[in-house]
Image (tube, grey):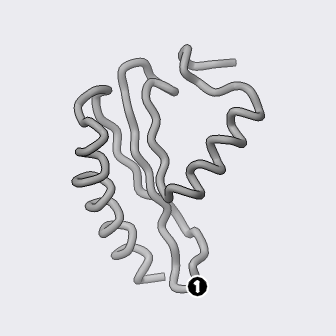
Amino acid sequence: SAYTEKTLVERREFTDLLNSIRFSGFSFSESEYVEGVSSLALPVFDRDKRVVGAVSIIFPQGQYDENDLHDRLIEKLLRCTNDIGAVF
């Protein structure tokens, strides 16, 4: 069952989302789990390019626009994931 009206529950929608995440390198969601809360997540890769974890942040929906996400948040989280992945 869905947590909110925006929760993906159809397998095809979920598969499409996973493909989009693989292509973009990050996951962004708005009110999919908790109404009014957005999240951004990036994978942590080890030296062999295997996923060993993830880093995510949550924030109030609407706090950041698309430019902020790309220019500020994704860039900072990418540095964080690279630093973490360097020790694996």
Q: Locate residue 20, reporting x and y percent.
A: 59, 48
Q: Give the residue at x 44% y 50%.
A: 41
Query: What residue is at 41 percent from the left and 82 percent from the top?
Result: 86
Q: Point out the image quarter for the N terminus.
A: top right
| Crowd rating for badge 1 (residues with CA inside 10 Å; few <14, some 14–19, many 20+) | few
Residue ID at (41%, 56%)? 55
Can you say whether 12 is above or below 4 in the image?
Answer: below
Judged left or right of residue 27, residue 59 is: left
**Can you give x and y, in whole percent of width and height, for residue 35 in the image?**
42, 18
* Residue 68 image position (x, y, % from top left): 23, 45
Q: Nearer the viewer, residue 81 or 26?
A: 26
Q: Kindly give the residue lying farthest to the right in the view shown.
A: 11
Q: Which residue, given by chain and number where applicable, does mark 1 sit on?
A: 48
Which residue lies most toward the front here? 67
Vertical comparison of 9 with 77: above or below: above
Q: Amino acid at mark 1?
A: Asp
